[in-house]
C-alpha cells in the first residue's frame, strides 16, 4: 500500500493557526500580558502575611494560565467543544481573580479570553459570554463601594480592548475560512482535472489497442494467408524471400498482439492521482492517503462516484466533524473496490442522511454499489463506499 501524509498546518480549519501551539507568537504575547498583569495585581506583602483572598486570587491567575497552556499543548482547537469550555473557564477564573484581588487591571486578561472564544463559537454567543464576564466584574466593583457610573467609566476602555480582540479574531477567522474554502474548491477542480486526464488517456489506450487488433492485426493475418498460398506454389516455395516474409509477418503479428495485451493491462481509470489531488491542499488538518498500487476502476461513472464520495466525506469531516485527522484508504475488497474515509472529529449522536449522504448513496446504488456510515466508540465517523466489478 502507498501511504502519503499531508499536514500543511495543525489545528482546526476554522481557527487561525496563529493560536495553535504553546510557542506560537500570539501565545507569547498572552504570556507577557499575563505576567505584567499578575505582577501588577498581586500584593506580595499580603501574600507574605498569608492573606487568603490574595493567595486565592493568585491561584485563579495561575489556573487561567494553566488552562491556556493546556489548551495550546493539546491543540484543542481540533476538539472545538473541549476548547470552548476551556476558554469559558479561563474567563471565570479571571473574573474570580478580579473579585478576590480587587485590582481593575486583572480584567485586561479577558482580552485573551475574547480572542479565543470568537474562534470557537458563533460571534453572538462569544459577545454574550464576554458581556456576562464584564457584568460580573462591574457588579463586584459596585458592591465594593464604587458608583455605577464609576464602574462603567472604568469598564469602557476594557470593553474597547475586548471588542478589538473579538472582531480582529472574527475577521481573521473569516479570512482563514475563506482561504480554506478556496483551497478545497481548488482541490476538487484539480481532482476532476486528473480524472478527466486519466479518462482521456484510458480512451486513447483503448482506441489504440482496438485499432492495432482490428486493423493491423486483420491485415497481417491476411498477409500471412497470402504468403502461405505462395509457399504452396512449387515454383515459389523454395524462394528465400517468401520464407523470410512469412517469418517477418509471424513476428510482427506476435509483436502487435503483445502490445495490445500490454495496453489492455492498463484498461480502466487510475484513481491515485485524483484522490491525492483532492486531499493535498486541505490546510489545518492532517490527511493520510493510502491507495493500493495500480488500482483502477472500469468506467468513468465508477471513478466519479468514488471521487465524489471522498470529496463529500472530507467536506463533512471538516465542516461538521471539525476533524484534525482524516484517513482515506482505497483498496480491493470483496470482489470490488472499497473506499474508506475515517475522521477523528465530533461524531453525531444520530446519523441522518441529508442531501450529501443521500446523493452519495443514490450515486453508488445506480452502479451497483453500497454506502455504509458508522460512528466509532470513542469519537469520529467512518464512511465506506463499495463498488463491484473491479478491473483486474
Image (cartoon, helix red, strand yellow):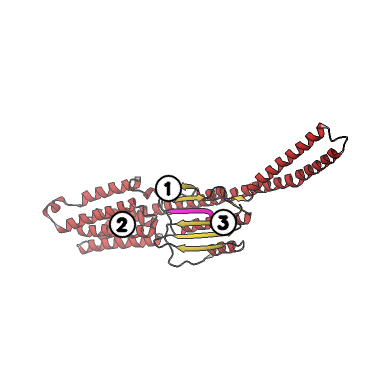
Of badges 3 and 1, nearer the viewer stands 3
**Residue 332 among those drawn in magenta:** yes
Local SS, label 2: helix
Separation of marks 3 and 1 at Cα, in angstroms = 26 Å
| Sooner in the amino-acid sequence: mark 2 or mark 1 | 1
Image quadrant where residue 140 sits: bottom left
Magenta residues, as a range?
Answer: 324-333
Q: Is residue 160 left or right of residue 143?
A: right
Q: Is residue 229 left or right of residue 91?
A: right
Q: Nearer the viewer, residue 166 or 157?
A: 166
Q: Is residue 319 left or right of residue 370?
A: left
Q: Main secondary structure of the magenta part?
A: strand
Image vertical order of residue 377 relative to residue 211, above or below: below
The residue that disc 2 covers is 156
Tag shown at residue 306: 3
Give the residue at x 46% y 57%: 342
Q: Residues within 10 Å of mark 2 (few under 14, many from 20)?
A: few
**Residue 117 among those drawn in magenta:** no
Q: Residues within 10 Å of mark 1 (few under 14, many from 20)?
A: some
Of badges 3 and 2, nearer the viewer stands 3
Give the residue at x 38% y 48%: 18
The residue that disc 1 covers is 9
| Residue 248, percent from left and from top | 76, 36
Separation of marks 2 and 1 at Cα, in angstroms = 37 Å
Give the residue at x 33% y 45%: 23
Separation of marks 3 and 2 at Cα, in angstroms = 56 Å
Q: Nearer the viewer, residue 195 or 168?
A: 195
Amino acid at each position: 500500500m502507498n501511504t502519503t501524509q499531508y499536514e500543511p498546518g495543525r489545528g482546526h480549519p476554522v481557527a487561525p493557526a496563529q493560536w495553535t501551539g504553546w510557542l506560537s507568537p500570539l501565545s507569547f504575547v498572552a504570556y507577557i500580558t499575563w505576567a505584567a498583569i499578575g505582577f501588577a495585581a498581586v500584593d506580595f506583602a499580603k501574600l507574605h502575611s498569608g492573606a487568603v483572598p490574595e493567595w486565592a486570587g493568585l491561584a485563579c491567575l495561575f489556573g487561567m494560565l494553566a488552562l491556556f497552556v493546556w489548551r495550546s499543548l493539546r491543540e484543542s482547537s481540533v476538539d472545538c467543544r473541549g476548547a470552548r469550555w476551556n476558554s469559558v473557564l479561563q474567563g471565570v477564573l479571571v473574573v474570580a481573580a478580579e473579585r478576590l484581588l480587587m485590582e481593575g487591571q486583572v480584567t485586561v486578561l479577558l482580552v485573551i479570553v475574547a480572542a479565543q472564544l470568537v474562534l470557537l463559537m458563533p460571534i453572538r454567543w462569544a459577545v454574550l459570554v464576554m458581556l456576562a464576564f464584564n457584568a460580573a466584574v462591574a457588579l463586584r466593583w459596585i458592591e465594593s463601594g464604587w458608583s455605577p457610573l464609576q464602574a462603567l467609566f472604568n469598564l469602557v476602555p476594557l470593553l474597547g480592548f475586548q471588542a478589538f480582540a473579538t472582531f480582529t479574531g472574527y475577521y481573521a477567522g473569516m479570512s482563514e475560512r475563506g482561504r480554506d474554502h478556496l483551497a478545497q474548491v481548488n482541490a476538487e477542480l484539480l481532482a476532476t482535472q486528473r480524472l478527466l486526464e486519466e479518462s482521456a488517456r484510458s480512451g486513447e489506450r483503448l482506441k489504440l489497442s482496438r485499432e492495432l487488433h482490428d486493423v493491423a492485426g486483420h491485415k497481417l493475418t491476411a498477409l500471412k494467408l497470402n504468403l502461405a498460398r505462395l509457399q504452396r506454389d512449387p515454383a515459389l516455395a523454395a524462394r528465400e524471400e517468401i520464407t523470410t516474409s512469412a517469418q517477418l509477418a509471424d513476428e510482427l503479428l506476435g509483436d502487435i498482439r503483445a502490445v495490445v495485451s500490454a495496453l489492455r493491462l492498463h484498461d480502466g481509470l487510475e484513481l491515485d492521482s485524483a484522490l491525492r489531488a483532492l486531499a493535498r491542499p486541505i490546510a489545518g488538518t492532517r490527511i493520510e492517503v493510502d491507495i493500493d498500487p495500480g488500482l483502477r476502476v472500469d468506467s468513468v461513472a465508477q471513478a466519479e462516484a468514488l471521487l465524489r464520495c471522498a470529496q463529500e466525506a472530507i467536506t463533512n469531516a471538516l465542516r461538521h466533524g471539525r476533524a484534525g485527522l482524516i484517513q482515506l484508504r482505497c483498496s480491493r475488497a470483496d470482489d470490488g473496490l472499497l473506499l474508506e474515509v475515517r475522521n477523528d472529529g465530533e461524531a453525531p449522536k444520530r446519523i441522518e442522511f441529508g442531501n450529501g449522504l443521500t446523493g452519495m448513496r443514490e450515486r453508488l446504488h445506480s452502479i451497483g454499489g453500497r454506502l455504509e456510515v458508522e460512528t466509532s466508540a470513542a469519537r469520529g465517523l467512518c464512511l465506506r463506499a463499495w463498488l463491484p466489478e473491479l478491473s483486474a
